[in-house]
Amino acid sequence: MSLEQLKLNKQLITAMQDAGFSKVREFQARSISRILGGQDLLGIGPEGCGKTTSLVLTTLMRLKYAQEEAPRALVLVPDKESGLALLENFQLLGKNTDLRYMGIFPGAGMEGQKEELDKGVDIVVGTPDRIQAMYYKSKINLSQLKVFIVDDAERHIKQGFQTIILQIAESLLKCQHLIFSEVYHEKLERLVEPILKHYNTVEVDIESIEQMDVIDQVLYHVPNYKTKLNLINLLMRDTEEFSKVVIFANTKITAESICKSLDKRNPGEVALFKVTRSSYPSLPSIETFIENPEIRMLIVSNEENPITDTVDIPFIFHFDIPPSKVLFIDRIKKETSENNEKLSFSFATDIELILVRKIEQEIGQNLPVEELPLGLIIEGDRKSHKEGEAEEQHETTGAAFHEKKASNAKTYNYKYMERLKLFGKKHRKHKKGE
């Protein structure tokens, strides 16, 4: 699709060409016409797929020219840095219009911001907390809004802005609502449903890039930290399969918490990596761990020991998704001397899915999601708690799992490596866009 086929006015097409745009991305092609048609929209896609450009172009196109004093478009951003970057995009693509933009962020005085608003502003970009504070003090008029936008919704959720965003949305008169996010999960759904009515969803996957050669992956999507802890305990129950395991946690506190939990159920089989002043065993190197016949689980803190060399370890677990995608990718890259049956497990909550998405972009493939195993207690799930109560009372050290009745048990018990061989890698890995 050419730029001209986007049905934008000449001023915007010229600005795009001047900015170096030469082709239309999939997200732009699928979303811009819907937005210009006045539909509410949920846009999901990775960084760089064109969400910001679509947001900016459609807002400029809908408003066309400066009019009145009250803002007609409000864009909520998670922080000042994101807001300033978005304002630069408005200035870049809106250079051939007379539309007026303004950023409203914490740190500046409200009176000064109100004075600037009173001069007349068409598009306001701001953080939810400051916009709400200004609105409650009658320092910003939102009665003339034509479009209300939440950008980087997943980051708003991570910062706890959901309630404020819902309160702002509820106070608005009828207008178009747009929400953009890199990932979709349950927390985002709870934000979307009260705001968007009869909306369209545009979702694009990672754009095709060269696929990196990595070891086999398994991703478990879990609701919270406690369920992660239950899951690692349940998996580590299989002593035959998981004979040597390295488990990575983001902080020393989390690493010690994992160690404490696993040691209760597997006494003498767990150690921390290079930790002093701990009541649990500590090993100085991966080599020492490999040579130790008694220790089968080594817990490593990314915070203090961001190691990447685990060539001779058959299983690695990312209990937390590290903030640095480089660290994660360095651990899963396949080396020429690597054991072909090496496997990497990752546990991710809703909040961590954005980090997973960035990793997938970099390696050119999706991390295959595995169903949570039978017998796992899902913390926060009332039914799962009930099923686990009797087991907890019977054996407090076995709280991470409970036995299933024979009639409900799995009829198969393929080991992870056996399943990979049986079903083939094409069923375990997905290239970008599949």
Image: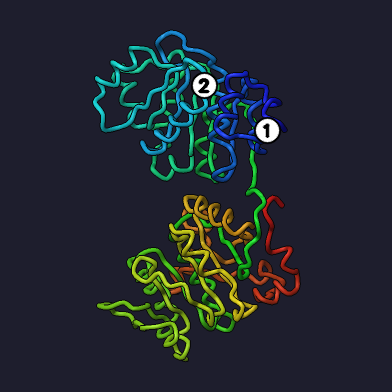
Q: Is residue 98 left or right of residue 255?
A: right
In this rendering, does residue 163 appear at all? no
Mark nearer the viewer, 2 or 1: 1
Q: Is residue 409 left or right of residue 179?
A: right
Q: Mark 1: which amino acid? A: Ala
Residues 363 and 374: in front is 363
Count of labels in the image:
2
Q: Is residue 168 left or right of residue 133?
A: right
List x then y, in percent, for residue 12: 58, 22
Q: Which mark is residue 147?
A: 2
Mark nearer the N terminus (2 vs 1): 1
List x then y, in percent, for residue 179: 53, 33
Task: Report the Cα–Cα distance between label 2 and label 1.
Answer: 20 Å
Q: Mark 2: which amino acid? A: Val
Secondary structure found at label 2: strand
Q: Which residue was labeled with disc 1?
A: 29
Residues 431 and 167: in front is 431
Secondary structure found at label 1: helix
List x then y, in percent, for residue 298: 43, 78
Q: Which mark is residue 55?
A: none
Task: Determine the residue positioned at 56% across, 25% down.
Answer: 15
Residue furthest top as drawn: 68
* Placement of 24 over or under 354, stated as above or below: above
> Quarter of the image holding residue 302?
bottom left
Task: Determine the residue positioned at 69% across, 57% down.
Answer: 431
> Quarter of the image holding residue 368?
bottom right
